[in-house]
Amino acid sequence: MTGGQEPYLAARVLNALLREDYGGLAARVTRSKDGVALLLPGGRRVRLTPGSLFQDFVVAPEEALRLTEVLRTLREISAPADAAGVEAFTRECHEALRALDLHDAHRDGTLARLARAASARPGGAALSRPGQDGATNRSDQDGTVAARSRMLLGAVRYETLAAFADHPVYPTARCRAGLSDEELTAHAPEFAPAFELRWAAVPRERVTGAALPYAPEFPSAGLPRELAGTHVLFPVHPLTVAEVGKIPWVVLGPEPYLEARPTLSMRTVVLDRDTHLKLPLATSTLGLRNRRSIKPDTLADGARAERLLRGIPVPGVLIADEQTYGHAGHEYLGWLVRRLPAGEIVPVAALPAPLPGGGQVVEEIAGRWYGGDVTRLLTEYLRLLFGLHVRLFIRYGTALEAHQQNLALVLGNGPTRLLTKDNDGLLTSPSRLRAAGLPVPDFADERMFTDDPHALADVFVTITLHLAAAAVVFGVLPSPQASRLVRDALAEALAEYGDDPMARLLRARTLDAARLVGKSMITSGTLVDKARTGARDVNKFYGTSGPNYLCRPPTTIPAVTMRRTPR
């Protein structure tokens, strides 16, 4: 008898292997008078049910799978060349299961703290930034530090709730490779922790970029004041201290300074209500090859991407300010300050997430800003989403990797607006930019360029349509209503461009398609070496497809909303 989160995770892993047809697993699907089933190599017949959002068949809810039998199946269908990847994914599965069980054990305590912090949500009294007006982490004059800590918890409330919902597609997203239980509870967003940053003195001649506004005085980090003449202080995430300590030309400060709390992305932390700080992490997520370090060129490329987008104004859309950054030519020595606009900011990933007292975040937001009308809120969101991405695709040959984690609603001070951030993974067509009269950014990463419209459409479908639209709306509304809402919003956005060739292509790839392209995420992220997949970018590797839920709504809800935490 299986219990806890094991059957849930085992089903998600087997579903992903089937969706990506790893090792020809789809050929083992059988159809008979008893229904559709997947015959495992060990002889077990696993009943499948139709109607999932992103694939034709998924493991039936009543099938109580064990992770060991799914991993045994993986080993038996894998190619010998994938042995290292299979072992890595096996570790990933076990770490994901441990993280799921750990989250369950801490769930009630985390929700209780969030409930107490509800009064600290955006809109309360402003606090001075750390280091200003004499406020530091070491002094608690008039309760400044305690008040700031409560403010930070309120600022990450929706980020934390978003972390309660699993990734819509990647089955082992809870895994942060190599981290212990103690490291997870102290730093992962689903636990709503607080921690202080560490600091490293880096030789000034190695530093490129701006001065960090939040850097302390050297003695506050436990370092000699004299180093200020030759070195610059870099923030270091506590989980990256061991790696930074191995760099011979860095002097690591022994004293922590400046409280922070993690956002959904974990490597990005909140410093105050309108400021995030992105830091390298010594781990991997969404696959072994998705390292959370920061290559120096990506910071400059992200700033270039932001400037490109600012040259393409779209009504109702805001671009986060990500122009302030620094690096020292090392993947664990870099930082990015993200400045957010005024207003209440709600990450899109949080909308289908559960509320502490029941219901979903989207209901709370709709209750405050839309008279309780969830459908009107989602309709407005989709109008903004497709208004931006359809325009970028058709007029400028550009597709953003703006999934639900990189998008937010900005509420207050007028109509709802859509905020996009972290755009260093966009794909753009130099020829279409030139045709539109825009300069082509000098991206260091050539993978950000393509003149292939189908490559751009792949990003639009798998990111904008699947993750930013469908995973959110289907996670809130009944399938027929969700399908109609997404379809109508996309059709409306496309209608503005008539018979433009790029509009026809996008319509053919979405509204009129028999099937929708998907990404083979575990195949490229962990299981198969890049030399064998041929993937230039493991985050843009395709080869799978699923039913078109815009034409034929699924009969089951997405896996992201199915998990119910034991109480």
Image (spheres, rainbow, N blue to C red):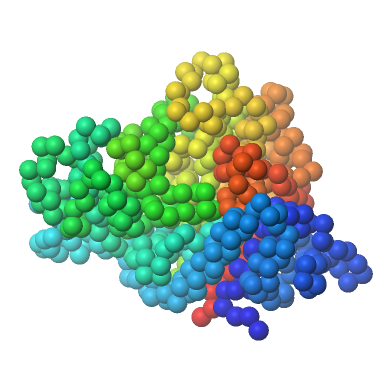
Residue appearing at x 11%, y 61% in the figure: 139
State the image coordinates of residue 387 (x, y, percent, origin top left).
56, 35
Q: Is residue 549 above or below residue 164?
A: above
Whether residue 29 sits left or right of residue 490 in the image: it is right
Q: How many marks?
A: 0
Front-most of residues 349 and 182: 182
Q: Residue furthest left?
A: 226
Front-most of residues 92 and 47: 92
Front-most of residues 199 and 497: 199
Q: Is residue 303 visible?
A: no
Front-most of residues 164 and 27: 27
State the image coordinates of residue 27 (x, y, percent, origin top left).
82, 57
Q: Residue furthest right?
A: 33
- Picture quarter with the N terminus: bottom right
The image quarter containing residue 428 is top right
Q: Is residue 15 above or below residue 464?
A: below
Q: Residue furthest front?
A: 80
Residue appearing at x 28%, y 61% in the figure: 195
Residue appearing at x 73%, y 50% in the figure: 546
State the image coordinates of residue 341 (x, y, percent, origin top left).
35, 42
The image quarter containing residue 50 is bottom right
Whether residue 123 sits left or right of residue 376 in the image: it is left
Q: Is residue 66 above or below residue 277?
A: below
Q: Is residue 134 above or below residue 60?
A: above
